[in-house]
Image: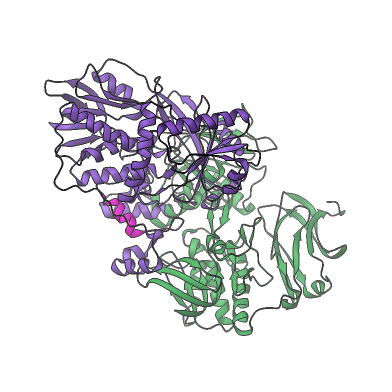
Amino acid sequence: MVDVVIIGAGIVGCSLAYELSKYQLSTLVLEKENDVACGTTKANSAIVHAGYDPHPGTKMAKYNVEGNRLIEELAKKLSVPYKKVGSFVLAFDDADMDTVRDLYDRGVKNGVPDLQILSAAETLALEPNLNPQIKGALYAPSAGIVSPWELAIAMMDTAMKNGVQLRKSCEVTGMEKTEEGFLLHTGTGDIAARYVVNAAGLYSDEVHNMVSAPSFTITANRGQYYLLDKNQGDVVHHVIFQCPSKVGKGVLVSPTVHGNLIVGPDANDVSGRDDVSTTREGLDFVMQAASRSCDKVNYRQSIRNFAGNRALSEIDDFIIGEAPDAKGFFDIAGIKSPGLTSAPAIAVDVVRMLGGAGLPLTPRDQVVDRREKITFRELSPKERAALIAKDPRYGTIICRCETVTEGEIIDAIHTPTAPRSVDAVKRRCNAGMGRCQGGFCGPRVLEILSRELQLDPREIPQDKAGSAIVIGETKVREDIH
Amino acid sequence: MKYDLVVVGGGPAGLAAALSAHENGAQKILIIERDRELGGILNQCIHNGFGLHYFKEELTGPEYALRFIKMLKDTGIEIKLGTMVLDISEDRVIQAMNSADGYMVIEAGAIILAMGCRERTRGAIAIPGDRPAGIFTAGAAQRYLNMEGYMVGKRVLILGSGDIGLIMARRMTLEGAKVLAVVELMPYSNGLNRNIVQCLHDYDIPLYLSHTITDIKGHERVEKVIVSKVDEKRRPIPGSEIEFDCDTILLSVGLIPENELSRGVGLQIDPRTSGPVVYENMETSMEGIFACGNVVHVHDLVDFVTQESTRAGRAAARYLKEGAAGKEQVLPVKNGSHVNYTVPQHIRPANVEKFVEVFFRVDNVYRDMKIVVTSGDKELCSFKREHMAPGEMEKIVLPKKFLDAAGQEPITIAVVSQEGEH
């Protein structure tokens, strides 16, 4: 019997695991994929929203503004790439300027600091590559950019150092209410828990319905993106939004924390919740829509396109709290934008709710709340020299595009969340994230994984379980008769 | 650390350049190679066909590389393997690192850039669809097969008919895979004709010209690929879809000179070649920094890389001995009709001994054409060609006397019909 089971290891599940790990509890996180941060968390705009967008009084407004502050703090403590670059919402006509004023008012009510409405000239002075036809913009200096998957991974790694357990490739297939709490059925056996938190993202309605009367439905809404080479990374220096419409916050253009440029997303409902395919129409739409903000992006410098699915519910707010008909079962569902920004604040509040529902919250005597991580490319020449002298494995560059050393790859492999695929390593140290997309370093990363884990390369997937890279040895003569 | 000459890259370009610099009197030469051995991409090119021009015999890639590696013996040229150059400054200070020497700051009298090129990826051409495993650039697949000893798939579709794609079609077939098709966006192949014959025709592998991939399906590995015919503007034609059941896609969709270091130094880059702008002796826009091989422009044959790099090495040795070449008279080389780029982009006639070789590519397939070299209104010379194609690099030789006659006007290289029509 564990105290708390968290279903889902996306940004929400990882944030909650991190918060719960500060207390003397047994916490178990169940994740159906073979790594954490594999769903919506790894494929989104990666924006730390300022908080002017949600309507005052909503959960989204409250958690967004609080989360914005928490992420800055967490990123520092956990060595997660984060930059407070600020954001603009561009207005192209008078109606847009009205929207900008509305957003300003909302932001002020929500407690967003330092908002300003800028004239076209003031905006263009800060961002000369924008469309000169703009009328003005809302400037939010507290908006930022972050690496969402690295934040989730860092929180889970840290939580695990405090005793939280993670079971990957473990899908919850059913759940029963018991006298002491819940019995969860999974592909790898049953688990008893006093409290269950549903952080199952795109599948949170299905998990909810296992023990509670249906009260919401999740629709997967896909957003497609272009990611561009670092040589496009300074086309803009802030997050550039257009005015939000009914279909969402529109297409943005933004630098990423890794120095690239991201452009997207579109918004379309998809029938398959795991359908994150890209389409020609979607990518063309993104390019077209973004050109209204900035037509200086060179799409020939595209290095990757991807899509992620938003977990939308029919309720225009986050769904957070205890199910009325299943005491001890908490939903954190419908976590659409600004979900990434809000997640750390939601986690703090849900811990409080769990306490209110009877979970004893006794602080641990010793809490790990920091994570040191070596990122070679950010070191000075002097620090680099000292590091290589101490451990020569940091002297071998494996990923030449992103300057990632063998030492960093080995560090990543031996973290608590234990990456077991080439892409899982990429998500932890950036090897293969660059312009050649792993063309050169892929074979080397596979070799290092195979060596460090004593695994046959055929058993090491590209990403998800079953996504084999190599299928056998060359010149195997067994099928020649 | 101080060297007279540092060569960045130990592939065919770097090896030939270092040897040539040594033969021409350069002392204290260092080759920096990021991989574990010298030879560069030749090491994974285990097929033959290398050296026909340079050695007048047919060698495999590793054999071709070995000839040069053997020549290094007794030259005193130093080699650092597994070493990455992180930065080069204008005053030729190189920051490099490896696990044995640690972090190095190297001062160089002259530098030759020979970093080669990389492959364009799926992301670069934005192929829509799912993102399963089983999609490789042809060169990455070649490395898995020929160097690591692993097979990457059983039922294969290849996008792009560049030489690596063609070579891999044969290689995968010989290794027991079924290559279903090679799909080419353009109405012609960019590969060498001999590779079309020896790698596709000989193995009955169909080549779909004017086709492209329009969708990829598959959750874990590739399961299906949708290929569509394209119109003359290269847009997919609805209704022309062909479905292939396959587990692997190899991409041979172009090579990009790898010039991140060059950009870092601030070298002038030619957007047409994606390589540094060079003078007649392969010197870049920055004094004492030379470049050669695929980092300058993508070559079809390694033999030509060797020749070009030999010139770069000789020029670097001369620079170390005599100092910078004069820049009193600099003739830009301009693209005329149907010419996509030229290398060199500038010629200093005073620095030319007997002749200059100019390399270029045409923008389409042509028959019975004429290459015309002009200076202002004056035709300097012309050359007839029966067949020209973008996949086959053209070379012309301009004698010094023509250059001296050019005056200060730029030189234009154009391809026209034999009647003189553009």
**Which percent across, then down, holds residue A20?**
21, 38
Magenta includes A386? Answer: no
**Within the image, what quadrant is residue A293 found in?**
top right
State the hue of chain B. green
Q: In this view, does A257 lie above or below A358?
A: below
- Residue A102 seen in the current view: yes
Magenta extent? A402-418
* Vertical comparison of A234 with B218: above or below: below
Residue situated in front as seen by the camera: B29 or B384: B29
Residue at the location (21% across, 19% down)?
A326
- Quarter of the image for the N terminus of chain A: give it: top left
- Residue B42, position in %: x, y? 50, 62
Residue at point 46%, 49% (across, down)? A437
In the drawing, does residue A181 fall left or right of residue B79?
left
Q: Is residue A188 visible?
A: no
Image x and y of residue B254, in percent: 58, 50
**Residue in front for this viewpoint, B173 or B73:** B73
Left/right placement of residue A303 relative to residue A152 reads right
**Which chain can be seen in purple?**
A
